[in-house]
Image (cartoon, rainbow, N blue to C red):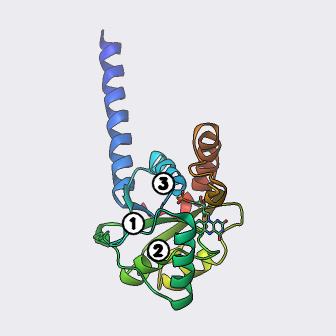
Amino acid sequence: MLKKIHFLIYLLVTISFFAQNKGVISEDILIVYLSRTNNTKAIAELIQEQLGGDLVAIELETPYPEDYDAIVKQVARENATGYLPPLKTRIDLDKYSTIFIGFPTWGMQLPPPVKSFLVNNDLGGKTVVPFNTNAGYGVGSSFRTVNELCVDCKILKGFQIKGGVERDGILLAIKDEKREQARKLVQAWLAEISPGIPR
Ligand SMILES: Cc1cc2nc3c(=O)[nH]c(=O)nc-3n(C[C@H](O)[C@H](O)[C@H](O)COP(=O)(O)O)c2cc1C
């Protein structure tokens, strides 16, 4: 009987230690992402699954057109002129020390709404971690632009993976078996960068 009670006490102490520890870490983490066809959202969810933290989608005041050709043209125009679309999403960043920022590659660049987010928010002193999905052509200049726009941030190694190919009608690709593969890759990447995440 006494053994059972001791074991129960041990179990409770262990559980409460892990619960508290997890809370302290995850409260400081924001996972913010832009996603049109939910591939980047899938990676954001896998990060949250591992680390906890708050998950927030970047939304625009005026959404982009549904039509693929129309959005490609609009984004090309915005990239050429440096237009920064106004965002509906407003986040109080004060309580976060680590910000994961996710986005697809658009026109081999950082999407204009993510440029808006970085220009309009002061991320100074924060740890910033970029992650990306693309159609197989890579991150282009997007990670470089995150570095340029995050003044006084500590930027950790980013993650990228092939997502959808909307041009060919492939929208959400990171599902089922591909999501399982992505989960393992995300786990390995987080293990690699975790010494740089403030506790
Ligand atoms: C406007 C637009 C431009 C894109 N440009 C590129 C590109 O330059 N290179 C690339 O690899 N994929 C490009 N893609 C494909 C997306 O990066 C890819 O499908 C990504 O996984 C979509 O992420 P999401 O599902 O989170 O929106 C583009 C998609 C859109 C809608």
Residue shown at the point (56%, 88%) measured from the top left: 80
Badge 2 is on which residue?
114
Answer yes or no: disc 3 within 8 Å of ligand 1: yes
User: Cα distance, mark 2 to mark 1?
Assistant: 8 Å
Q: Is residue 96 above or below residue 10?
A: below
Which labelled disc corresponds to residue 58?
A: 1
Distance between the Cα atoms at labels 2 and 3?
14 Å
Q: Dot 1: what SS?
A: loop
Answer whether residue 125 is visible to the viewer in this image.
no
Q: Is residue 139 left or right of residue 17?
A: right
Task: Name which residue type carries label 3.
Answer: Lys
The reply, left or right, for residue 138 in relation to residue 61 is: right
Pointer 3: what residue?
Answer: 41
Cα–Cα span, label 3 and label 1: 11 Å
Q: Amino acid at mark 2?
A: Val
Q: Position of residue 5 (x, y in %)?
A: 29, 17
